[in-house]
Image: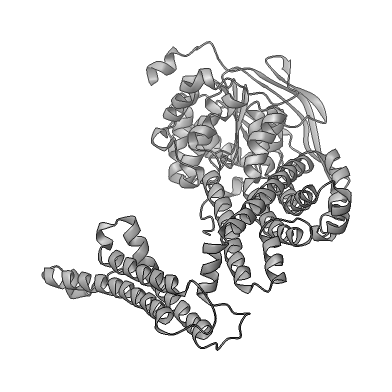
């Protein structure tokens, strides 16, 4: 972080070192102070002018912004005593500054001067209002979505993994499954929607099936290619050491294929999100997808934005979780991608 | 450590290998490419035999047959009179590449054989001993990508030795190491062999290495490999690289390989 000039580094001026350190610290603190200022600006933007519309949480939001500004300021000044929290805050100060500025601008552009057309661009307080006043419904939707997604994803991932290992390992299984996979796999899972909702007893089971399908295909293909790509030398080594076929599958083929499996799980997660939202919009009467649809029906644009933000946090969180698990299981790999 | 090695059942001496009239061929684009032609060889228990031949002559194929990884087209291979039909941990191979499993630590790699045979729980100390024998105790928890080439090959050696093999099959195990590491590991190999008394079958294309390590050097012809000469190296260990007797043999062997002009 700190920059030493040559004269500082050759040691006869302790003062030189300490001033340049102080300067670096000042620069870090300046970013924090600036971030605090942009949040104050956001607060002022909320409180200074009258709203052009009727929003009940403007005042609360303005106060909250000022409180956040105060927290940022205190955190910045006391960063040295806050350990990891302080370091994290210092590192994110520029982003916090940008966020505060963006919110202030957004506030002015919507609630105060209506530069952007209402109701398509709701002001921050309208979204804030959704989180405070419509929380139970939103939470119910989140729980419904997570349940559906988790069930479908786990079933799809498990089925895909087992299928992939089987066709990668056994030629006769591959003979029968491979053509089916080639025929059905590339079909977007959403194309099954009408049939699935007709064939399955409930829209919930139909959606679970579709999510599992969307997850299963990439997991199958990548597990399969991972298993098929394991070097014969590994099998030779294990066989000369007395390994039986079950050991070769469980302790050689699967661990060797695991990096591929995780690529498949990642891709499957992405496509399953798409299916989840579509399934909820069309068939299931619960979940964030349904909430979006419902909000659109009422032209409740603030609710849509609020739901979108939650959805994005959930999807991003799911991917983060998957990457954590991968990093844990694949510590032996050098240089795995950081998410 | 040494005391422990001596306390081990010394009766576990090497096995005899009997290779009789073995022929082998590969199918390449439908045509049979002969690689071994009527190879017969008897190796006594505890012998250190080097197979020397031009590259691509079929030496490694012979090792795969001895290991039981492939059956021969015709002929028989026996270990102590028992027909070799499949791989068995009494005949362990050390390959040219260490082929450590990258997802396992050194310790877990060395434990592989015992784990595969389902006896790891009762014999964990053998893994520690084998790792100590090759001097990797400080790296037991390292992953293969953290090891140097020499260290990785040592770990591969420990992975083989932990099974107390009767026959150690060495497929150019030092071929890819730098010359200094190689010289050190040749000496280590000799001392391990003397201590453990297994039968060793080494494939190499380095005449000097063969003469430094082996009791017997078998010179093979170009593909398809036939036995050209069976040379006893009657010299005590540890051997000296400058030994004029070995230098003579080396000249003779290079002559058999058609390289006399270079010496």
Decide: is B230 above or below B13: below
Image coordinates for residue B229, horizontal then vertical, percent = 66, 31
Way the structure is coloured: one colour
Image coordinates for residue B15, horizontal then vertical, percent = 62, 17
Q: Is residue A235 left or right of residue A71?
A: right
Decide: is A168 above or below B214: below
The answer to which of A249 and B87 lies nearer the viewer is A249
Name the residue: 57% across, 19% down. B119
Q: Is residue A230 left or right of residue A202?
A: left
Name the residue: 48% across, 26% down. B127
Task: Name the outermost residue toward the left.
Answer: A12
Numbered disc total = 0
Name the residue: 16% across, 69% down. A18
Quadrant (top left/top right/bottom left/bottom right) for the N terminus of chain B: top left
Q: Is residue A314 left or right of residue B24?
A: left
Decide: is B98 above or below A324: above
Image coordinates for residue B186, horizontal then vertical, percent = 47, 35
Q: Is residue A272 visible?
A: yes
Q: Is residue B248 visible?
A: no
The answer to which of A21 and B158 lies nearer the viewer is A21
Image coordinates for residue A80, horizontal then vertical, percent = 25, 60
Name the residue: 59% across, 37% down. B252
The answer to which of B30 and A296 lies nearer the viewer is A296
Decide: is B207 above or below A152: above
């Amino acid at each position: 972080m700190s920059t030493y000039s040559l004269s500082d580094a050759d040691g006869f001026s302790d003062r030189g070192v300490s001033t340049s350190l102080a300067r670096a610290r000042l620069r870090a603190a300046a970013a924090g102070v600036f971030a605090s200022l942009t949040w104050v600006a956001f607060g002022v933007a909320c409180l200074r002018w009258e709203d052009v519309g009727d929003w009940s949480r403007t005042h609360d939001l303005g106060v909250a912004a000022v409180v956040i500004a105060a927290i940022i300021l205190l955190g910045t000044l006391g960063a040295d005593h806050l350990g990891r929290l302080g370091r994290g805050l210092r590192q994110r100060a520029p982003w916090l500054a940008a966020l505060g500025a963006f919110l202030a601008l957004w506030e002015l552009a919507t609630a105060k001067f209506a530069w952007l057309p209402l109701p398509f661009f709701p002001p921050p307080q309208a979204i804030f209002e959704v989180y405070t006043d419509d929380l139970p419904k939103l939470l119910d939707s989140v729980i419904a979505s997570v349940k559906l997604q988790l069930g479908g994803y786990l079933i799809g991932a498990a089925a895909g993994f087992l299928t992939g290992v089987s066709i990668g390992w056994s030629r006769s299984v591959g003979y029968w499954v491979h053509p089916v996979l080639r025929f059905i796999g590339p079909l977007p899972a959403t194309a099954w929607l009408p049939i699935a909702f007709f064939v399955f007893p409930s829209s919930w089971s139909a959606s679970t099936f579709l999510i599992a399908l969307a997850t299963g295909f990439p997991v199958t293909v990548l597990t399969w290619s991972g298993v098929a790509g394991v070097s014969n030398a590994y099998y030779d080594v294990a066989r000369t050491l007395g390994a039986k076929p079950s050991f070769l599958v469980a302790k050689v083929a699967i661990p060797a294929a695991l990096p591929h499996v995780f690529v498949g799980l990642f891709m499957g997660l992405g496509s399953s999100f798409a299916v989840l939202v579509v399934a909820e919009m069309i068939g299931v009467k619960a979940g964030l997808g349904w909430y979006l649809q419902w909000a659109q029906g009422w032209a409740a644009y603030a609710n849509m934005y609020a739901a979108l933000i939650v959805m994005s946090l959930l999807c991003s969180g799911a991917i983060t979780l998957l990457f954590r698990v991968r990093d844990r299981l694949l510590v032996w790999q050098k240089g795995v991608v950081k998410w | 450590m040494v005391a422990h090695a001596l306390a081990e059942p010394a009766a576990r001496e090497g096995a005899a290998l009997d290779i009789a009239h073995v022929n082998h061929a590969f199918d390449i684009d439908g045509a049979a490419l002969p690689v071994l032609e009527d190879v017969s060889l008897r190796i006594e228990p505890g012998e250190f035999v080097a197979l020397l031949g031009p590259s691509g002559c079929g030496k490694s194929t012979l090792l795969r047959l001895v290991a039981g990884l492939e059956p021969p087209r015709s002929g028989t291979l026996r270990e102590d009179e028992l027909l070799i039909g499949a791989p068995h941990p009494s005949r362990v191979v050390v390959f040219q590449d260490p082929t450590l499993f990258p997802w396992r630590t050194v310790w877990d790699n060395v434990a592989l054989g015992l784990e595969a045979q389902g006896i790891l729980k009762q014999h964990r100390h053998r893994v520690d001993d084998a790792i100590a024998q090759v001097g990797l105790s400080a790296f037991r928890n390292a992953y293969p990508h953290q090891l140097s080439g020499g260290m990785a090959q040592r770990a591969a050696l420990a992975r083989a030795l932990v099974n107390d093999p009767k026959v150690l099959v060495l497929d150019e195990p030092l071929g890819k190491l730098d010359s200094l590491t190689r010289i050190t590991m040749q000496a280590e190999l000799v001392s391990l062999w003397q201590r453990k008394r297994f039968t060793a079958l080494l494939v190499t294309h380095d005449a000097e290495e063969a003469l430094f390590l082996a009791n017997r050097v078998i010179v093979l012809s170009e593909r398809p490999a036939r036995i050209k000469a069976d040379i006893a190296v009657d010299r005590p260990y540890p051997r000296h690289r400058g030994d004029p007797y070995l230098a003579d043999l080396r000249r003779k062997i290079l002559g058999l390989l058609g390289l006399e002009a270079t010496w």
